[in-house]
Image (spheres, rainbow, N blue to C red):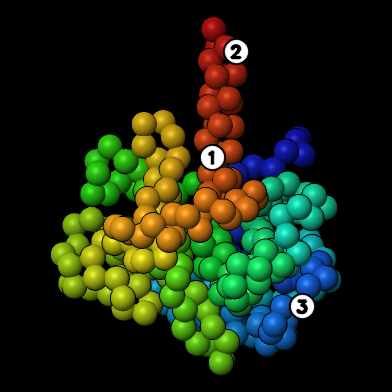
Amino acid sequence: MTTKPTFSAFNQGQIPTIACFNKATTQFGVDLDALIAAMQAYIVNNVAPVWGTPANLVKTTDFQPGAWAMVFLDDADQAGALAYHDLTPDGLPQAKVFVKTTLENNDLVSVSASHELVEMLVDPAINLMTTGPDQNTFYAYESADPVEALSFSVNSILMSDFVFPSFFEDFRQPNSVQFDQMKQVTAPFQILKGGYQIVFKDGQWNQTFAQRDDAKKKAFAREDRRQHRSEQRIELMKRGRLERSELRQKVA
């Protein structure tokens, strides 16, 4: 028996319950109950029909046994009370929304929350990658990053745009199918202005941006990336290398 959380497929064959609770002191700018209802509609009407990832959102006051989680915090500096990076105390996925940081960046909490929600549903273990236009590069299955500057209304609350599975299919011809919810992407692996793509090349994780999108590059450099999914990918890769190294030493 071990208490160490295991990164793997989660709740496979089950519809996860996601406990949504607030630990932030900063006002959201949107009612939490209304936000949860909008995100539930977002899942049912937009995300699940495309990605096959249903989920049930419930409002709670803390983590719930056996449930995934979405926790609202003021900022990354106050994330120390959380159990283990992007996992709940039960070792299940969680999304963190930093309310103060989001608002100070002139972004909407609803868009940040729905961004993290769709990415958690599509890739809960933060370990999915695919090949793409550059055969020497792996592209992370981050479903909101390439279009993160775009949003649309659900129940009169703005939700994040997200890409479709076809986005990661390099064999698709431009304009042949729908590549994102808002129909703004016209080809596989196209990054829209204000978005980015996490890639793994030459043994390192990095980010690529839309051509001539210098504003996004500068904004990205200023962001507090601690506890972000992109940082978790780096930690997962380092941990994987360490565990493989330890295994080789034991075998030797």
For this rendering, which residue is in front, 137 or 222? 222
Q: Sequence-wise, which precedes: disc 2 or disc 1?
A: 1
Residue found 54% across the figure and 39% down from its top: 234
Type of amino acid under label 2? Lys
**114, above or below 131, in the image:** below
* Residue 218: mark: none
Residue found 72% across the figure and 86% down from its top: 31
Q: Is residue 109 visible?
A: yes
Of badges 1 and 3, the one in the foreground is 3
Of badges 2 and 1, the one in the foreground is 1
Name the quadrant containing residue 117: bottom right
* Number of numbered discs on residues: 3
* Residue 250: mark: 2
**Dot 3 corresponds to which residue?**
27
Q: Sequence-wise, which precedes: disc 1 or disc 3?
A: 3
Neighbour tally class for label 1: few under 14, some 14-19, many 20 plus, Cα within 10 Å: some
Type of amino acid under label 1? Ile
